[in-house]
Each structure stands twice: as structure tokens, then as C-alpha cells.
Image (cartoon, rainbow, N blue to C red):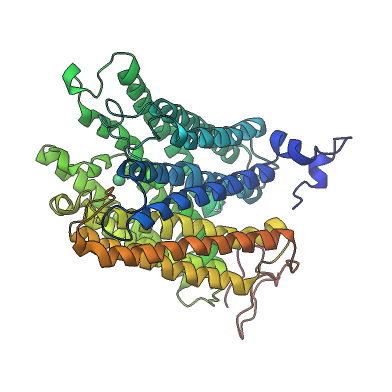
Amino acid sequence: MSTATAHDTAHDHHGPPAGLSRWLFTTNHKDIGTLYLWFSFTMLLIGGAMAMVIRAELFQPGMQIVDPNFFNQMTTLHGLIMVFGAIMPAFVGLANWLIPMMIGAPDMALPRMNNWSFWILPFAGTLLLSTLFMEGGGPNFGWTFYAPLSTTYGPESTDFFIFAVHLLGMSSIMGAINIIATILNMRAPGMTLMKMPLFVWTWLITAFLLIAAMPVLAGAVTMMLADRHFGTSFFNAAGGGDPILFQHVFWFFGHPEVYIMILPAFGIISQIVPTFSRKKLFGYSSMVYATASIAFLSFIVWAHHMYTVGMPVAGELFFMYATILISVPTGVKVFNWVATMWRGALTFEVPMLWALAFIFLFTLGGFSGLMLGVTPADTQYHDTYFVVAHFHYVLVAGALFSIIAAVYYWLPKWTGHMYDQTLAKIHFWWSVISVNILFFPMHFLGLAGMPRRIPDYAIQFAEFNQLASIGGFAFGLSQLLFLYILIKTIRGGEKATDKVWEKPEGLEWTVASPAPYHTFATPPQVK
Ligand code: CU1
């Protein structure tokens, strides 16, 4: 795939560096976007392999494949790798590819820092994974690394985990600064804020969330490091500290983090749905305000992860009401997507299929989130598989599906080739069926009382666990098909024309351009 253009090299007499140095020294936003996306896909496969170990062990009650400590390392690293290695870098990769083109900028505002923020990632990721091979094993305290499990009782490799989290945070903050600087300073004349494509808006708001949330995470791991080695007792009750403080600090980062992983997804869906509905996005400005409202609210709901620690009732009520309030702007978004499709000239090509699955399944995850937000109900299923079901619906059928939708949507533009649509449809149906076989039974397991992060379980949970494991293996396998489709598209195949998407039966375009492929412009309108 060649992404260097004549424009990029106009003032370079020697031509652009080739081979490895092209990728190591690149300051080109498209190259960096490609690097981010491949890094993310690699991490998806590694984190996915860990999920396969987890599902293999849980296929039957009793211990068959791994010992409990290794099982805990798998759940911990699966979560960390998917959050910091797969989902977040994929969105930054899409931001790199799309934001400059969407706002008419020649590149990102800070191209050298852009290179640096990417190249930190492979080192941080390798460092994190290398903890598995250290004496005493890797981190085994869950992706939320609660004290005192991670401080007093953490394995020696915890210090390398802390360093890896610091590095990942640096990368994210630099990426966010770059995105804000680009959007605020480099828009083409006439590209006012309220004309920006929704993907740009959602990323602008996400970047502010990153800048506010990541330093809090850095603070949490720094306090951990001090507790472990420098004689402090931030989280140690014996020294006058409080382990509950850790949960407050962690979730003050952690809740905005979940919106960091979903707001760019909202942006992607808001780009794709209008194109395949042949209508303008319904309620553009309400989408912008809803995104900003969600971002604001995301900072005042963190203790809904801690209803069982024994907060004052007034505190529990505050966090319950604030949490449930988020469903209002989120409902605005879902309403607007449906209203965009209403009486549109719909076609169901691959990116639209993923976007529709997103709307259905993310909303389902939103409803179970609403259930979890209700304090007295949450105490019933806190730390059960119901929680696992909930956040996998929003992060896999939500965030990951939006990323896959985006890749299918823009792949012809990136590579110049059309992907194999038959295989892509098989990939979609295979994934959407298996993801529900994988995660839907977990609701029942949780409501029946199966705790999360446990390698063994009581016999009555066996059937639903087997079902989930079968769904899990199928879902994992279908992402290998995705890899095959991607490689096939990059290496060749049908040339992408300017009419990538079908013209619906009997529909006359009412704009001059016959090409709904112009995905950065307003899509053709229905009469
Ligand atoms: Cu939360």
C-alpha cells in the first residue's frame, strides 16, 4: 500500500525514505494512522488469544487447563491489552487517518510528536506482555488493579506494569494534545466548528477527556509505586491510608475512560448511517451537545463502580441519579440515528450492517448499564458475570464493532481496492451471531450469582458457560477471517471506483455528483 503522495515529497529531492525507515521516521498522518491500526489489530489478536484461554478454562467446571494464578494473569492482561492496546490505539489511528482530511488540513499539527506518541506504544505493549515471563508471573489483580492486591500483594512484575501504564498514558496524552491542536488550529477556511463532521467533534471532546483522565491514572500508579517502595501508605490502612481511596482515584479515571472508548464510536456511526440512508444526519447540533453532555456527566458518576464499599446513602443517591441522567443524551443519539434512517433510501452494505449491529447491541449494553446504575439493584449483581456481559456489549458489540465498521467504510479510500463483499458479509454475520452466543448467556450467569474473575464455578453454571465458550471460539475465529479479508484487499483485488456503494433501486440522485463514495461530503439526498 502506498500512501505517500506527490504533495508530501514535493520539496524532498531524495524521495521519501523507504522500507523500515519509512515507518520508523514517518511524520505522515496516514502512515502513522496505518501503524496505529496494525498495532491495534495485533493487540486485538493477542488479547483475544488470552480470552480464548479464559473461555477454554471456563468450558467446564473444575480446573483443566491453567492454574488459578495464571487464569488471573489472563483476565488482567486481557482487559489491559484490549483497553490500552486494541480499542484506544484503533481510535487514535482512525483520528490520524481521517481528521486532517475531514477538516482540510495537510497533516496533524505536531507531526514529530505524532511519530513519538505512536512509537512509545509497541515498547509499552511489549513491556506489559513481558511481565508474563517474569519471576512470580505477571499482574494478577484484575485490570482495575485494586489496592491492596496490587500494592501489598502484587507480584514483583507489578513495577514493570506501573511503568507500562505510565508509558501508555504519555502516548495517549500526546495523541490528545495533537488532535486538539489540529482541530482548533488547522481547519480549512470556512470549516467552522459547527460544520465539522461528527467524527471530528466526538474526537475533539474525547481528547479533552483523555487530558483530564489520563493524569489521574498516572497519579494512581505513582501512588501505588510509592506505597510499594517508598514507605508511603496512601492505600494502606495499617499506615493510616485507605484502600477505598484507590477505588475513588481509579474510577475517577476509569469512568471517563469508558467514554473515551465510546464517543469516537458515536462519531463513526454518525458518519456511516447518513451515507447509507441517503439523508443528512438528523439533529447535528443536538448530537454535538449530547456528546459534550455525556463527557461532562462522565466525570461525576465514578462511584457507581463502588456502590458496595459502604458510602453514605446521600452519596449513593447522587451517583445513581447522575449515572441515570447519562441515558438522556445517549437516548438523543440513538433517536437521531433512527430518525436519520427514517424514510431514507436504505441499503445494507457491509459498513451499514456493522453500524446497525452497533446501534442494536450498544443500546442493549446501555440498558444493562442502566440496571447496574440503580444502587439497590447493583448490590445484587455487583462483581458478577452480569457486569462482564454489560461491558462486553458496550466494548465489543459497541466500540469494536464501530472500529470494524469504520475500517470497511474507509478501506477502499485507504487502499484503492474494494474488499471481497461476500467474505465481508460472512465476517459480519459470523461475528454478530457468535458475539451474542458469547456474551448473552453471561447475563443469566450473573443474575444466577456466578462471580467474575473466577477460574472454577458451581456445576449449575456449566451449560451457559459452555455456550459462551463456543460463541467465544467462533467469534475469535471470525476475526482471523477479518485479517484475511484485510490482507487480500491491501494486496490487490477489484479497484475501488468512485461508486463504491450501491445505488438503491429506483432512486435518482438529487445532487450533481453521482458518487455516494464521497464519504467526507454531504451524502446525496433523497428527493
Ligand atoms: Cu462507570
Instruction: Say which residue appears at 25% left-offset and 64% top-offset.
Output: 462
Q: Position of residue 199 (x, y in %)?
A: 53, 52
Instruction: Say which residue appears at 33% left-offset and 24% top-offset.
Output: 224
Going by the image, does 68 lie left or right of 524?
left
User: Ligand 1 sits in which quadrant?
Assistant: top left
Q: Position of residue 440 (x, y in %)?
A: 32, 65
> Quick one: which residue is furthest to the bottom in this view?
506
For residue 162, above or below residue 37: above
Q: Position of residue 209 (x, y in %)?
A: 42, 39
Q: Is residue 520 at all visible to an observer of this figure?
A: no
Name the residue nearer the viewer: 301 or 16.
Answer: 16
For residue 266, above or below residue 310: below
Going by the image, does 401 lie left or right of 68?
right
For residue 511, above or below residue 25: below
Name the residue nearer the viewer: 128 or 486.
Answer: 128
Q: Position of residue 437 (x, y in %)?
A: 37, 68
> Quick one: which residue is furthest to the right in this view?
13
For residue 22, above or below residue 413: above
The image quadrant where one finds the C terminus is bottom right
Q: Is residue 383 at all visible to an observer of this figure?
A: yes
Name the residue nearer the viewer: 472 or 65.
Answer: 65
